[in-house]
Amino acid sequence: MSTWSEPQPDSRFVAVGGSRIHYKRAGHGPALVLLHGSASSLQHFDRAAALLSESFDVIRPDLPGFGLTGPRKDRDYRIPTYTATVAAFLEALEVPRYAVAGNSLGGNIAWNLALDHPERLTGLVLVNATGYPEKEIPAGMRLTRNPLLRPVLRRVMPRGGIERNLRSSVGPHSTIVDDAMVDRAHQLMNRPGNRSAFVDFCNTDQPDRSARIPRITTPTLVLRSASIDGQHFSRDIPGAREMVHPHGGHLLPEEEPQWVADAIAKFLRSSTDTPTH
């Protein structure tokens, strides 16, 4: 059985500010950064990354508060802080320009990177991304906002609850939620500090920057599942393209890695100004 709470043979670490960022990197070609969602980890993109690494230099960090990167000492889980950390992480790796694809929270960080560092981005892919204030909050996150449950969830995240949350996050025909997937999520959530970091993240008052989304100039692809609230990215980002998967759920890169990888690769290859790293 895999011990997900320990580094794997291809794990790498780099110091960024006060954090030690865990990441994986594989492949050759233009730089492509993959950002996972909340309560997740870089393994969310395992299968899609394996496909994309045939054509791209694929870089996947564990975002602060999750995976093997673990909690921030200052407990600052605002999106602008995540955005600055990801930008600094890529500076530390000496990657000057890159495309970025993000799922859910990762998509939120990705479009904020496009606003704050447009000179660095060669392409933007938003996969079931978040960022508009009317986005529905998942049930698992709502529980952490209950003042009676909050201290309990800092001490324990039951495996059964994590499994229910995963099953509610995939499409009706998906079979990806198995014991290995639940074990991975449970082990990583129960690493020291990660439970409290998740509670802190869910209770963070996030600034609303959605009014700035129409200012994004980076070539953008919006990938979403038909059952997921698409927000307004394809409407608000000038020239954005959108592809809709008919039966995927929120965890689209894990549910349909070939579909996601093919869509990203085709989109990025169409950008002739994407530099080789």
Image: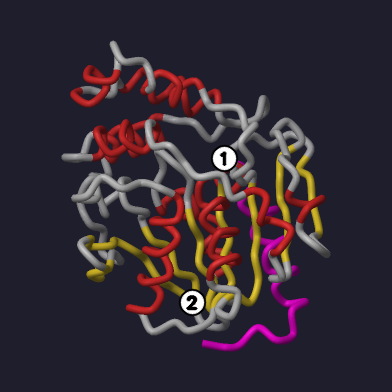
Q: Is mark 1 on a helix, strand or loop?
A: loop
Q: Main secondary structure of the magenta part?
A: helix
Q: How crowded is mark 2: few (under 14 residues within 10 Å), some or many (20 or more)?
A: some
Structural crowding at the residue carrying mark 1, measured as other residues with C-alpha within 10 Å and reported as few (<14), some (14–19) or many (≥20):
many
Q: Which residue is drawn at 74% across and 85% down?
A: 272
Mark 2 against mark 1, which lies toward the viewer?
1
Q: Residue at x 31, y 35 (%)?
A: 200
Is residue 259 located in the magenta-colored stretch of the structure? yes
Residue at mark 2: 27
Query: Pointers 2 and 1 in contact (CB under 8 A)?
Result: no
Q: Please determine whether, in this image, residue 43 is positioned above or below residue 90.
A: above
Q: Earlier in the sequence, mark 2 or mark 1?
A: 2
Residue at disc 2, secondary structure? loop
* Residue 185 x, y percent position in the rendering: 35, 36
- Tell me the magenta residue range: 255-277
Q: Count the marks: how many?
A: 2
Look at label 2 and name its amino acid: Gly
Residue in front for this viewpoint, 248 or 112 = 112
The residue at the point 37 percent across, 63 percent down is 85
Left or right of 155? Residue 249 is right
Residue at left 59%, top 72%? 99
* Image quarter hosting the N terminus: top left
Q: Nearer the viewer, residue 117 or 94?
A: 117
Q: Position of residue 134 (x, y in %)?
A: 65, 31
| Residue 67 image position (x, y, % from top left) | 31, 48
Q: Residue 251 carries which label?
A: 1
Side of 196 relative to 32 (left or right):
left
Kind of residue sitting beneath label 1? Leu
